[in-house]
Amino acid sequence: MAIRETARYWQYEELPGVDLLHAHYIRKEFSRHTHETFVYAAITEGVEAFHYRDELVHAGPGQIALVNPDTPHTGQAGVPEGWTYRTIYPAADLVQSIAADVLPVRGTVGFTQPVVDDPYAAQLVIGVHRAAEEGNALAADSLLRLVTARMLRSHGGLAQPLPPRSAGARDAARARAVLEERMAEPPTLERLAAELGTSPFALLRAFRDAYGMPPHTWLTDARVRRARRLLDAGTPPAEAAVAVGFTDQPHLNRHFARSVGVPPGAYQRARGVRG
């Protein structure tokens, strides 16, 4: 009998600011996307392959894939049988507060490598899931803080400082602001470049250098992120789709599942939100 893909994306109310995903994927391919949160993905079976910035990396059993906020990455099976993982998405301010207690540095922190070979830490991530499933708030919160502190001590540090703001970087930031403001009806690349007083190719290159993806890919990612906030607020998926600029709900479904891992309706139901 064929093994089917499964995924549950949810929240435990006693862990505010933390999302959870338990999934088994075989043919799933995550498009290049970002998260507003950190990502700790403990692989329990198979292998996940993912592009982290411009590097293709692999994570297998006993390893944790780590992704910092706003860092472009993908995701797909690294072996024919796919991969199974339990993932935690802790809010950036939660990780920052723990870092203030365990790291002798001050400033915005992040993880310095995308894959950590630490079976004990992987078991802690799994333990957070199991405690949440059992309704054990004390254990879930404690294990989350323990695994975060452990990984910060061994693989944490100050986030890389931003390079000096070149003219291209300033154009990229202005373009991003325009796309944010006009998300539902964005201009073409040519019109956007003309508004900013630059050329389409120069803007394309500057935007990719600044944000790790071209403007159209960034816009799709931004639409999904805004749609998630609308879904969390109880907006029906069909209305959220139109509000962020997708043509219809199937259009949102396709891109949402390729970024989040589940369709918007399942995401909303699992989080106890009534659309």
Image (spheres, helix red, strand yellow):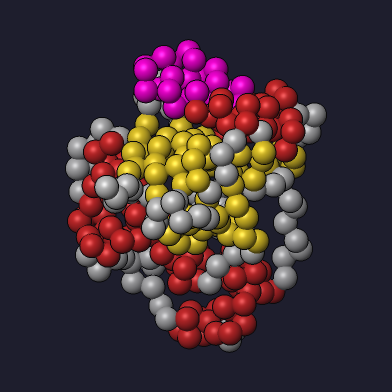
In this picture, residue 170 sits left or right of residue 11: right
Q: Which x, y percent locates residue 66?
A: 60, 43
Secondary structure mostly seen in the magenta stretch: helix
Queried whether the magenta region covers residue 7, the answer comes back as: no
Horizontal side, residue 251 vs residue 199: left or right? left
Q: Is residue 39 above or below residue 2?
A: above
Does residue 42 sit above or below 231 in this rendering?
above
Which residue is at 41% across, 14% downward? 136
Magenta part of the chain: 127-148
Magenta stretch encompasses residue 144: yes
Question: Which of 171 and 215 lies nearest the eye of the viewer?
Answer: 215
- Seen at 69% across and 74% down, the residue is 167
Residue at (72%, 65%) from the top-left corner? Answer: 165
Residue lying farthest to the right in this orientation: 104
Q: Position of residue 238 (x, y in %)?
A: 20, 56
Q: Residue furthest front?
A: 1
Compared with 34, 218 (above or below) is below
Image quadrant in which the C terminus is located: top left
Label count reads 0
Give residue 185's quadrant in the image: bottom left
Q: Pinpoint residue 160: horizontal percent, then vertical percent.
A: 74, 51
Q: Quadrant of residue 156?
A: top right
Residue 89 visible somewhere in the drawing? no
